[in-house]
Image (cartoon, helix red, strand yellow):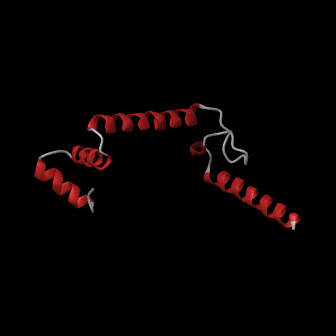
């Protein structure tokens, strides 16, 4: 492994290779696996992450707190998000006081 990004860049330049090739070689050496198996594992992880994003964007997901659900956050005005958070925290504090 490299101690810094500058070391990895220097290694790539000295070998005439891309930074990604140098990183892949270092990972294969570190794990004692070949480049193909490292790349296959990275591709599987990327598929899982892309699937999670797709399900999150297209799915009808709702959180128990109600902070996530009706409209995706990117469409909600910031004040509405702050208002919901304030309401949730105020309710939680009131509930906590009642339990004492």
Residue occupying the point 32% across, 47% down: 31
Q: Is residue 25 left or right of residue 67?
A: left
Task: Tell me where residue 25 appears, x and y as whole percent.
Answer: 24, 45
* Residue 8 locus on image (x, y percent): 22, 55
Total labels: the figure holds 0
User: Vertically, is 18 above or below 43?
Assistant: below
- Foreground residue among 96 and 40: 40
Q: Name which residue lies at 52% across and 33% down.
A: 54
- In percent of width and height, residue 9 lies at 20, 55
- Front residue of this view, candidates 73 and 63: 63
**Quadrant in which the N terminus appears:** bottom left
Quadrant for the C terminus in the image? bottom right
Q: 43 or 76: nearer the eye?
A: 43
Q: Left or right: where does residue 75 sit relative to residue 37?
A: right
Q: Position of residue 24 (x, y in %)?
A: 27, 44
Q: Does residue 82 appear left or right of residue 15 in this picture?
A: right
Residue, x 27% and y 38% (percent of image)?
34
């Amino acid at each position: 492994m490299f101690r810094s990004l500058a070391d990895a860049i220097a290694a790539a330049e000295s070998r005439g290779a891309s930074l990604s090739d140098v990183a892949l070689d270092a990972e294969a050496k570190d794990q004692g696996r070949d480049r193909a198996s490292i790349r296959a594992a990275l591709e599987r992880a990327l598929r899982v992450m892309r699937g999670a994003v797709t399900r999150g964007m297209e799915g009808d997901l709702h959180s128990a707190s109600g902070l996530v659900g009706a409209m995706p956050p990117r469409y909600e005005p910031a004040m509405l998000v702050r208002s919901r958070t304030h309401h949730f925290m105020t309710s939680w504090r009131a509930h906590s006081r009642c339990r004492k």
